[in-house]
Image: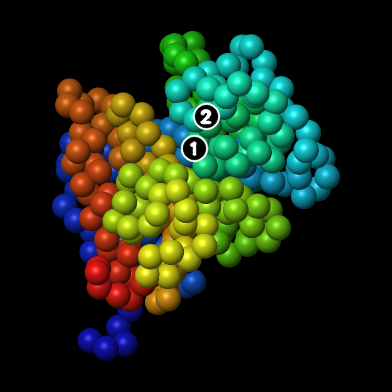
Amino acid sequence: MAGEPRAIDLPSLDPRVRWSLSVLDADEGRVLASHTPEMVCETASVGKVFLLIEVARRLESGELDPDQRIEIPDEHRVADSGLLYRMRDQRVTVADAALLVGAVSDNLATNALLWLCGLDEVRAVAPALGFANTSLHDYIRNERTPDLPWTPSYGTGAELAELMRRLGAGAVISRAVSDRVLDWLAADTDTSMVADSLLLDPLAHVEPEYQGMVLRHKTGSTSFARIDIGHLSGPASSVAYAVAANWKDSDDDLRAPALDAMHAIGEQLRGYVSGSARS
């Protein structure tokens, strides 16, 4: 009926996947959809958002100089996700290292910034924000052996969606800190998950793009996980979302059903914030 609050219709979720999912109306804080939102999942690179919050806080306070060149200790050199490990000149600034983390989830830049800020200090960011079951937990490692922390980051859909809602509202430490983090996340090139259905230009969506939508998000991927958290605004509304899918204990690689569900959720979010049909 006219005037009734709108909601998000979730697709069928593969029961073999461990899901933790929450979608909030970013303006009202109202829960639009959820599925086991308190379930703790491994969140791969998503915990890097807490590192970006700490870097932004220190830049705003003057504890860090944005033009300071990062150092990369040999014990924290890693490859894989990102660009810095492939670059000839790796003497990038703190501000540019943070941009690399936001844009391409750069592992080497992550470890350099984490070493600069201190692992314990960054681990303390999430609890200080009131999150009990979500955090960045460790450096990025080329190999995670049993003697190391069990995951680089972990979290719940409920807490991660709330994190993105607060960032969008300028309520993570301060408006200036929140805006710095959102600016780095604006460059995220990974639109393979929830964001796939938004039809945005993957390499150029800092400004309002398709159907007037603005996306700020962070993703994480492993061989057994896909996670996408974000703040999405459009002409009709704004949402904060977190969708985490894990299948670590499965004998099958379940990325196909996990991504299919994420794409279906993304289409629901597109319609909700744009107020328009897919065209």
Amino acid at circle 1: Val
**Residue 193 on image: x %, y %:** 32, 46
Name the side, left or right, on which 184 lies relative to 232: right
Name the side, left or right, on which 66 lies relative to 6: right
Q: Which residue lies furthest to the right in this view?
A: 62
The residue drawn where x is 57% and y is 37% is 100
Given contact means CB atoms under 8 Å apart, are the residues at marks 2 and 1 in contact? yes
What residue sits right under mark 1 in the picture? 104
Residue 125 seen anywhere in this rendered image of the structure = no
Quarter of the image with the C terminus in it: bottom left
Front one among 200 and 26: 200
Label 2 sits on a secondary structure element that is loop
Q: Which residue lies furthest to the front in this view?
A: 88
Q: Residues within 10 Å of mark 1 (few under 14, many from 20)?
A: some
Q: Distance between the residues labelled 2 and 1?
A: 7 Å
For residue 83, which numbered disc appears in the image? Answer: 2
